[in-house]
Image (cartoon, rainbow, N blue to C red):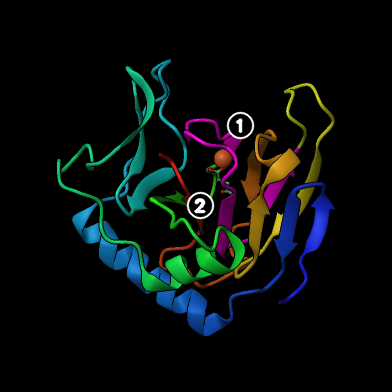
Amino acid sequence: MLQPLSVTPGFDLWPGLLDLEAQTALVAAILEAAEAAPFAQYETPQGKAMSAAMTAFGPLGWVSDRAGYRYADRHPGTDRPWPAMPRALLDLWARLGDPETPPDSCLVNLYRDDARMGLHQDRDEADPRFPVLSVSLGDTAVFRIGGTRRKDPTRSLKLSSGDVCRLSGPARLAFHGVDRILPGSSSLVPGGGRINLTLRRAR
Ligand code: SIN
Ligand code: FE2
């Protein structure tokens, strides 16, 4: 199998793993899903609107409002189940995530020009022994990753369209975020911007 770059222990990167055809097919699947499960800018529990808009694929989606963060089996706007996970994502997880247990959630983050995501840990999943697998589409992101304590030193790297990365083992609970995107660095996403997919085993 293609060897990833080990950026930090447990944080692996496969630059350009998805070719343009695969990227285009995923964007089409995302836009179709977004018709049934529209992108929404959730509120943090503190009442601030997040700058990235979100939707999800699969049995569970991640939602946030004044009541807190959680996985939910329905889209909060439509009260309908989330769209099915595209086959290509199930296959990617089987190769790089976990060969035995399928993902039960794929979060879809849409970053328009000035969207970002503050440094955080992904810790709403029941079992951190499962990795988080991330796919970047569209504009390049300036991504930041540190250690398991907020104060740990961080490093930043660019994630470009087609890149796949994985947080597992010692990096599974690493703080990470998106400082900014580089608008106009890709024309993949209609209307511009970046879409990030994260495959997870939430329950
Ligand atoms: C996330 O941490 O949920 C998203 C990371 C990214 O957009 O690359
Ligand atoms: Fe995250």
- The reply to whether the magenta stretch includes residue 172 is no
Amino acid type of the residue tagged 2 in the rendering: Thr
Note whether 70 is above or below 56 in the view shown: above
Q: Badge 2: how crowded within 10 Å, few (<14), some, or many (20+)?
A: many
Q: Badge 1: how crowded within 10 Å, few (<14), some, or many (20+)?
A: some
Question: Residue 98, position in %: x, y?
Answer: 55, 58
Question: Which sits in the foreground, 77 or 107?
Answer: 107
Question: Which sits in the foreground, 158 or 95?
Answer: 95
Question: Looking at this rendering, what residue extends furthest in the bottom direction?
Answer: 21
Name the quadrant of the C terminus: top left
Circle 2 SS class: strand
Magenta residue span: 117-145
Label 2 C-beta lies within 8 Å of the nearest ligand 1 atom: yes
Is 65 placed left or right of 134 in the picture? Answer: left
- The reply to whether the magenta stretch includes residue 139 is yes
Amino acid type of the residue tagged 1 in the rendering: Gln
Note whether 133 is above or below 73 in the view shown: below
Is 67 placed left or right of 151 in the picture? Answer: left
Q: Which residue is mark 1?
A: 121
Question: Looking at this rendering, what residue extends furthest in the left direction?
Answer: 79
Question: Residue 29, position in %: x, y?
Answer: 34, 70
Q: Which residue is mark 2?
A: 198
Q: Quadrant of ligand 2?
A: top right
Question: Residue 22, position in %: x, y?
Answer: 50, 79
Question: Residue 45, position in %: x, y?
Answer: 40, 18
Is 42 placed left or right of 189 in the picture? Answer: left
Name the quadrant of the N terminus: bottom right
Label 1 C-beta lies within 8 Å of the nearest ligand 2 atom: yes
Rendered residue at 78%/45% (across/down): 156
Rendered residue at 52%/43% (across/down): 115
Rendered residue at 69%/47% (across/down): 143
